[in-house]
């Protein structure tokens, strides 16, 4: 079961990640709406300059609007703008990073979750309590995120690049180019920027997504609502996707902003860490800013989870005799 669980989970995750990549890109762009720290004046943090609106508008001519009142647009508008301004290929910006991320992160978490679940299942009743499912998800998600963080940082940057002015774009050619340049220009540690957030988010997502899928599927079958088939898999996986989106969105917003921040040589970084990012985001844009991109998050998390588990169930059938 050991290796097979990793292979099955990896295949299903790559298929799900690639098929829902445009929705993930729109989510990232929406989570970055309202950020206002370019060009950075090194003397004071720009996201907190409420009383210095006059000074800000005179020194920064590129981003004139004050941070508390950013224009907000929905996922459809964001998607249409990307298509019109950057072309259809831009909807798949960073897809190579998605493949690498799913290969590293999701393969690890799915495989470990299955191993822990098998280990903690009661041999007599063949049942595993919900608490143990959640614990298995927390452990598997944390380890998987630590392994896949470099690909996660590269993916966020590649997805966000198109929203920057041409002079400020990083223009990574591929995920390998992104990781190589980050290591050379910003140090190897930059590949694990935001790793604490990635680990926390992955623990929440994996615990809520995998545990809730198993629990909801078991409940449906036990109550006789539906038989074990496509309908049950779709219902359980969509419900699991909703639970995962609600649990992870605030951490996801902070993670996206910390990973995407541009640190200029000799200048103070826009955020000193996750807590600083959260405080600046809430003070500048309000508490609901932590749920920016929730519609595309659930729009992506729902289909992603459905494709993930439906594909996983089919792959398991194929690999049943191996």
Image (tube, rainbow, N blue to C red):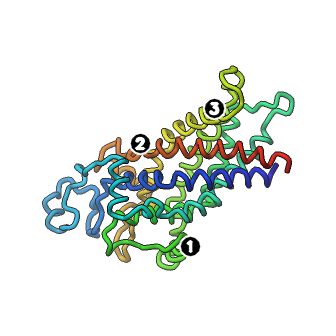
Q: Is residue 22 above or below residue 167?
A: above
Coordinates of residue 285 in the picture (x, y in percent): 29, 48
Mark 1 lies on a secondary structure that is: helix
Q: Callout 2 environment at 10 Å: few (<14), some (14 to 19), or many (20+)?
A: some
Q: Earlier in the sequence, mark 3 or mark 1?
A: 1
- Residue 53, quarter of picture: bottom left
Residue 187 placement (x, y as % from top left): 51, 75
Q: Is residue 239 above or below residue 303?
A: above
Residue at 53% from the left image edge and 60% from the top image edge: 152
In screen coordinates, is 56 left or right of 310? left
How far apart in space, not on screen, are marks 1 and 2 (Cα)? 31 Å
Check contact, mark 3 vs mark 2: CB within 8 A.
Answer: no
Mark toward the start of the polypeptide (1 vs 2): 1
The residue pinned by badge 3 equals 231
Query: On the rendered structure, is 159 left or right of 316?
Result: left
Give the percent coordinates (x, y) of residue 240.
58, 37
Camera-nearest residue between 309 and 170: 309
Residue 94 screen position, x and y as percent? 50, 64
Q: Secondary structure at mark 2?
A: helix
- Near mark 1 (Cα within 10 A), the count class, few <14, some 14-19 or many ≥20, is some
- Residues at marks 3 and 1 touching, judged by CB atoms closer than 8 Å: no
Image-based side of 79 in relation to 143, left or right: left
In space, the residues marked 3 and 2 are separated at their CA atoms by: 24 Å
Name the residue: 37% across, 71% down: 169
Q: Nearer the viewer, mark 3 or mark 1?
A: 3
Mark 3 is surrounded, within 10 Å at the Cα level, by few (under 14), some (14 to 19) or many (20 or more) other residues, namely few
Q: Residue at x 47, y 54 (%)?
A: 22
Residue assigned mark 2: 295
Say which of marks 3 and 2 sits in front.
Answer: 3
The residue at which mark 1 appears reads as: 176
């Amino acid at each position: 079961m050991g290796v097979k669980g990793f292979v099955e989970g990896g295949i299903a995750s790559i298929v799900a990640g690639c098929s829902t990549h445009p929705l993930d890109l729109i989510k990232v762009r929406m989570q970055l709406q309202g950020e206002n720290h370019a060009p950075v004046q090194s003397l004071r943090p720009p996201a907190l300059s409420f009383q210095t609106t006059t000074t800000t508008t005179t020194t920064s001519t590129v981003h004139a609007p004050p941070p508390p009142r950013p224009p907000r647009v929905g996922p459809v508008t964001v998607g249409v703008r990307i298509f019109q301004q950057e072309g259809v290929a831009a909807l798949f910006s960073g897809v190579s990073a998605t493949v690498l991320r799913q290969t590293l992160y999701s393969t690890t978490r799915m495989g470990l979750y299955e191993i822990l679940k098998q280990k903690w299942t009661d041999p007599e009743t063949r049942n595993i309590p919900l608490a143990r499912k959640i614990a298995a998800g927390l452990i598997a998600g944390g380890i998987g995120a630590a392994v896949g963080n470099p690909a996660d940082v590269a993916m966020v940057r590649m997805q966000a690049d198109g929203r920057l002015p041409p002079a400020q774009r990083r223009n990574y050619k591929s995920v390998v180019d992104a990781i190589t340049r980050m290591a050379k220009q910003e140090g190897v540690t930059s590949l694990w920027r935001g790793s604490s957030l990635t680990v926390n988010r992955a623990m929440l997502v994996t615990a809520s997504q995998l545990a809730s899928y198993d629990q909801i599927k078991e409940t449906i079958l036990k109550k006789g609502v539906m038989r074990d088939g496509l309908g049950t898999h779709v219902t359980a996986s969509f419900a699991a996707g909703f639970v995962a989106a609600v649990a992870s969105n605030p951490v996801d917003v902070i993670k996206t902003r910390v990973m995407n921040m541009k640190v200029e040589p000799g200048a103070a970084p826009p955020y000193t860490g996750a807590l600083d990012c959260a405080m600046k985001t809430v003070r500048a844009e309000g508490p609901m800013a932590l749920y920016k991109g929730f519609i595309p998050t659930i729009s992506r998390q729902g289909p992603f989870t459905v494709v993930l588990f439906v594909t996983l169930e089919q792959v398991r059938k194929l690999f049943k005799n191996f």
